[in-house]
Amino acid sequence: MTADVTDLMKKLVSLCKRRGYVFQSGEIYGGLQSSWDYGPLGVELKKNIETSWWNFMVSARPDIVGMDSAIITHPDVWKASGHLKNFHDPMVDCMKCKGRFRLDHIEGDRCPDCGGPLTEPRDFGLMFKTQMGALEDDSATVYLRPETCQSIFVNFRNIVTATRQKLPFGIAQIGKAFRNEITTRNFIFRSREFEQMEMEFFCLPEEAEKWFEYWIDERMKWYYGLGIKSGNIRTRSHDDSELAHYANSCFDIEYTFPFAAGGWGELEGIANRTDYDLKAHIEESGQDLTYLDQINKKKVVPYVIETSGGIGRTLLAVLLDAYREEEVEGRERIVLGLHRTLAPIKAAVLPLSKKLSGNAIEVFDLIRPHFPVQFDETGSIGKRYRRMDEAGTPFCITYDFDSLDDNSVTIRERDSLDQIRIPVETLIEKLKDLMDNGWSAEQ
Ligand code: GAP
């Protein structure tokens, strides 16, 4: 990593801690490597991303339904899916420096870090195993799911029966997934516990290509809707050597993560999984997971187009995209220019002086039922603006001494720093308009 990249990541990680977005898990005990806890603003941002995804993928569409499955999954699911067989990496350890490396990342037979001798390769399973029940033998082994989508395939028949959905249709899910990754780094980009937003779109085999292209476009629209700048996001087709065992074609949506090799890192994968998974579960379970095509009067095993993104990676991309440092009237300020729909706090009420707090709290109480809002009376007004800029709050509402006479307040917009003065009685209406339509130059 170059010094600039390290510096940017350090600054972002520090802001995340300072403002309550993301904390190192178990920090007071030295921290648990690659585990992260979302703080008060982080959890709101995460929820806003999830809600946006759910609205876009499920609520707004008649052809997609949702589900929420168990994390601890029947072991046969992973036998059928191919994970027990395929989901591991051969690893070697350096006998001198104790470093551990993926065999396919090593050239020659000596340690890439210190030149020491290497052990024979050993398989390193990526699934977290645990035991269910009192017995601790093999019959009690269960797995934490390494992806959320398998539960969708396993529930395919239940959902078709319950909802009477007709092809083409999708099933969507948001939830935790667990992978015992060999190397974890770059903050929340690659962790061992993370959240996925996955949608499996079932269609007739002959229509799979059409839907594959459709979903690449739709998913890009969603990322643009989060306010991600167009030059910072792209799609890239996998070549044959990169394809997962289940896919016959795959596109990644990539973001310009500053630490990523080649400048681009994966945000989401869109794959044509063919009928691989349903067929595998039909074979393993002996159950009929076919779909009765009423028009052609025949049973088919649908093809599946999958969209699979990570919440942590989306959150990191959104934060990186929003982070900026600038100078205003000779003073530096750090701003998170988050899109207003994602911002954890939509508005902050700031009395100019503590003497005005009683009246300003009435304004705060007025807004509270409508929007996530904060009240801050501590420190100079400049300091409070800067705290809110760093937190990504789009609108600050200042209550000053004139407010006592004219019952009006000033709204300051985070990015332009423009201000307007409006009567308190129209404040909610104005804020609703700003949340819907944004701040325009002619305010
Ligand atoms: N069902 C397909 C699947 O799981 P994947 O490419 O392995 O595909 C999909 O994962 C998405 O999940 C990735 O694009 C990424 O956003 C997220 N993801 C995967 N592994 C991750 C990890 N270790 N930490 C954080 N996010 C991860």
Image (cartoon, rainbow, N blue to C red):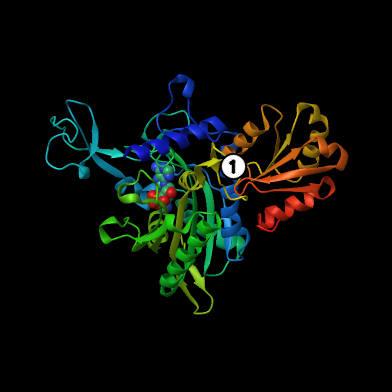
Q: Quadrant of residue 279?
A: bottom left
Position of residue 19 in the picture relative to residue 183 (left or right): right
The one of 312 and 338 positioned closer to us in this rendering:
338
Q: Position of residue 336 (x, y in %)?
A: 55, 43
Query: In the picture shown, does residue 97 fall above or below 333?
Result: above
Q: Position of residue 71 (x, y in %)?
A: 49, 42
Q: Residues within 10 Å of mark 1 (few under 14, many from 20)?
A: many
**Residue that protrudes farthest toward the top in the picture:** 29
Q: Position of residue 250 (x, y in %)?
A: 36, 61
Which of the image's four quarters has the N terminus? top left
Q: Amino acid at mark 1?
A: Gly
Q: How many marks?
A: 1
Foreground pick, 327 / 128: 327
Residue 303 seen from this side? yes
The spot of residue 209 in percent (x, y) is 41, 71
**Which residue carries the number 1 mark?**
392
Looking at the image, which residue is at 72% across and 45% down? 411
The image shows residue 47, relative to residue 375, as above or below, that is below
In the drawing, does residue 411 fall left or right of residue 210?
right
Residue 286 shows in the view: no
Instruction: Look at the numbered disc 1 and give the secondary structure of its residue.
Output: loop
Looking at this view, is 102 or 285 the one in front? Answer: 102
- The residue at the far right in this view is 405
Q: Is mark 1 within 8 Å of ligand 1?
A: no
**Residue located 37% across and 40% down the image:** 5
Is 264 drawn above or below residue 38 in the view shown? below
